[in-house]
Each structure stands twice: as structure tokens, then as C-alpha cells.
Amino acid sequence: MTNKLYDTSLSLLTDLYQVTMAYGYWKSKTAEKEAVFNLYFRKNPFNGGFTIACGLANVIGYIQNFGFSKKDLRYLRTLRGNDGEPMFEEAFLEYLANLKLTCSVSAIPEGTVVFPNEPMIRVQGPILQCQLLETPLLNLINFESLIATKAARLRLVVDTDKLLEFGLRRAQGIDGGMTASRAAYIGGCDATSNVLAGKLYDIPVRGTHAHSWVMSFDDEQHAFDTYAQVLPNNVTLLVDTYDTLQGVRHAIATGKKLREQGHRLAGIRLDSGDLAYLSIEARKLLDAAGFEDTDIVASNDLDETIINSLKQQGAKINIWGVGTKLVTAFDQPALGGVYKLAALRNDTGEWSYKMKLSEQAIKISTPGIQQVRRFRDERGFLADMIYDTEVMHESTGTATMIDPLDFTKRRRFNADQPHEDLLVTVFQDGQCVYTSPGIHDVRARVQEQLAGLHPGVKRFVNPHIYPVGLEKRLHDHKTELILKLREGQTKK
């Protein structure tokens, strides 16, 4: 389901330089030159070993609804250059008014584990159109992939416990909250406190009550009893407003009244204090009173590191509510995805490969019309090889993969090695040819993908580096192009 928060055009959800470059292409009569751009990131977030691809459904919705409205064009007419004159010619604005996207877009499906330098999205089409898609695609993919990855890490540490997303009140604005709720569910959360996300995205919603409920009554016992009378089929009581363990005793008293009415005390919630100690003591009180099936929910600025520590301390928590540090992607504020020109068709109809050079090897882009081939065996995923679709088709021979940062590291795969190509066609010449899976299917895919990774890749401290490399011909071509470009710059 695509984002329905906005009923206005989002075509100006971009950086100004995308529009000025589009104007430059139009003015120089190069707007229709066929180009290929790749969207990728350079480093896994959270010092981890993997990333979860997320955001494609909203990318599809954005592209399907792309178009400059009359209000958009009216605004662009107000922009002025340094001389006070209009920045754009009226003829260009008329061009934008009639612009229909005809790009072909391939992407790695949502819920797939991905790694640095792999193209998550490949856009091919007129360079002006490709350029206009850069900022919105990065905006849509970067944040959702970041949050889905954070949630996947939390899911790994909570294991079979329940994981709830409680972050709306601390999210970065309305859209940040909605986007985070969707991505967190995909990454592994079982439910959200965000009711609007539940409505729009079909995510289960969960919640208890706040301290203010307890404080609005003369005593805690009265507050618990009243809440149970109002919602007897949804009773999880927040017990730390005054004295936590006394609050547990009051919750037990309410639970006994619920039982007499044919209902049950679903859980208690701890939101402050020593969560390990309090949960252990609370469990003793609950079990002694015959409430072995009552859950213990914990919140209070949790993240995967804190949860792991609590588990090591023997905490008796089986439902984890994570808010601030999930929806704000603490402590990594951005994924750092980039969108780079990789090929441009020249006047003779042949592809001219393009790349960005840098003094830092990690920032040198890879040229070509790229695809990612994932090799596997009966134990799981073995390696990902980035190859050029113009050079390598279905091969009957051995494929050689080279580490782009160390050419001496090579792996060879026979033609009969099981594999799949990760990028699938989403738009063909502007027409959507891909059916997005439902959010529950995407969520299940994340867990299936994580199961295919070696445990070392999933550990939080010094994770094993999953092998990703370039197919030999692409590696050699990239090396030749680097040398050629450096030589050309030296001569100048």
C-alpha cells in the first residue's frame, strides 16, 4: 500500500539543483539522451553486517503519480536568478507541464538483505527524467531501509519475544512517524502503537495506558480496577507510576477480579527503573499469585544493545516496546545512499560508461548497467556478484568475482551454482509491470532472508563481512576507466 498522507503533488519534493540540471539538459537539447543511474549505499548502518531494502512500494506510488501541477509551475515561475530575472523560461515550464515519465526502473524487492555498493534501484531513460527522480528516490529508500534494518536487529536480539514499535511521539514529524511504523513492521516488529499506520498499512496495533490515567485517580488500585472495567479484554497495566512492585500487587488484585468475570490480566508494563531486577521480582509475584500467563512488557529508551544486556541479566521480560531509538534510527541518523550516473548512450547508439573518481576508494562509483547475482548453497547465501548486463548474460562457464577493494581476493563460481538475480523490472518504459507484495509478505521475506545469512554476518560486534564483489570483466573495465580518467586529469 502506498503512502496516502498527501493529496498534493510531490513533484517538487526535490533539490533545486535537480530542476536547474533538468533545465540545463532541456536548454542544451540533451534532455532525451538515454542514461543509467544506480542507487546504492556505501556502508552498512549501525556498524552492522547487513541492510534491509525497504521503501520500494512508496517509490512505485511516487513514480505512478509523478507530474507537475499548475500550482507547482506557478511556484517555479516565482524563482529568480541573481539578476532578478526569472530562473526558467516559460517554454521549459510548459515542457514540465506535459512531462510523462518513460523511464525503466529495476529494483531489489523490499525485504531483501542487501550490502554496500549493490544497486538497490537502477533507473534507465531520458537523462532529464532520471535526474528528477534522484532526490525523491533517495528520500524514500534511505530512511525506510534504515528503520527496517534497525527493526531487524531488534528482532534478532528479542528472538521469539514480542516486539512492539512505540515511537510515534518521538518520531521526526508526521511523515517520519508513519514511514518508521511501516518500515519497523517490515523489519520485524509485531505491532505498532500508531493507529493511523494500523489503518493505512494493515499493521496490528497495541497499547496500554499512560501514567496520567493512574494519576487522574485518588489511588492506583482504583485506577487499575476502572481500566479493567472499561476494557476487560485489553488489560495491560502500567505499574511504575509510584512504587513498581506495589503496582504489581495492585495489578494482581485487579487480575483476580477480572478472572471472576471470565477475563484475564494480559500483562503488566515496566517503564522505568532497573528493568532486570523489577521484571524478575514482578515475575515472582505474578507466578505466586497464579498469573503465570501474564506477560511482562518493558519500555524506556530500549535498543538492541540494552535488550541484549537485559537478557544476559536474566530479565523476565517477554514483550519489548521500543520507541525513540527505533523510529529515530539511533545512533545512525542516515543510511547515506547515493545515486550515480553509470552510463550514457552516445551519438552512435553505444553505451559510454561513466564513473565518479575520488581520493577515497570507497567513493569511486562503479560504471555500467548493473545487476546483482546472489549465489547460494544448501546452507544459505554465499556471495553477491555485481555484473554488467551488457557484457554478461546467462553464462555457461565459470564466473569470477573480485573484491573491489582488494583485487587479490577472488572467488569462482561454476555455471551450475544455484543463484538468483536480485534486481527485478518494476517499470518498463514508464509503465508499472510489477505487483508489490503485501506488507505481511514483505515482513516474512525479511526473516527468510536473514535465515540465509551466516550467523557471523548478523552479530552486532565486529560482524563478518559478507562477500560482495565485481564480476571480472566489470572489474577490469572499471580499472581501465579509472586509469584513463586519472591520466586525462594529469595531462590537463
Image (cartoon, rainbow, N blue to C red):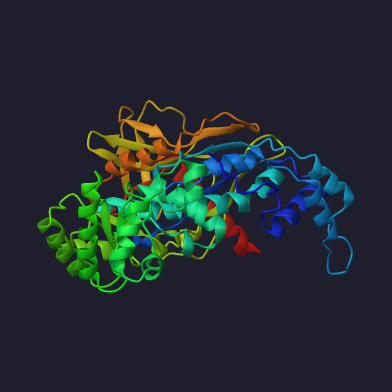
Q: Residue at x 57, y 28 (%)?
A: 433
Question: How many marks overall?
Answer: 0
- In this orientation, which residue lies closer to the viewer: 434 or 3? 3
Residue 489 percent location from the top left of the image: 61, 62
Which image quadrant for residue 448?
A: top left
For residue 176, above or below residue 276: above
Q: Is residue 50 visible?
A: no
- In this orientation, which residue lies closer to the viewer: 166 or 482? 166
Q: Is residue 124 left or right of residue 436?
A: right
Q: Residue at x 38, y 32 (%)?
A: 420
Which image quadrant for residue 104?
A: top right
Residue 71 percent location from the top left of the image: 80, 51
| Viewport quadrant of the C terminus | bottom right
- In this orientation, which residue lies closer to the viewer: 24 or 171? 171
Residue 349 percent location from the top left of the image: 68, 34
Residue 328 percent location from the top left of the image: 45, 62
Which image quadrant for residue 309?
A: bottom left
Q: Is residue 392 visible?
A: yes
Q: Residue at x 18, y 49 (%)?
A: 293
For residue 492, above or below residue 199: below
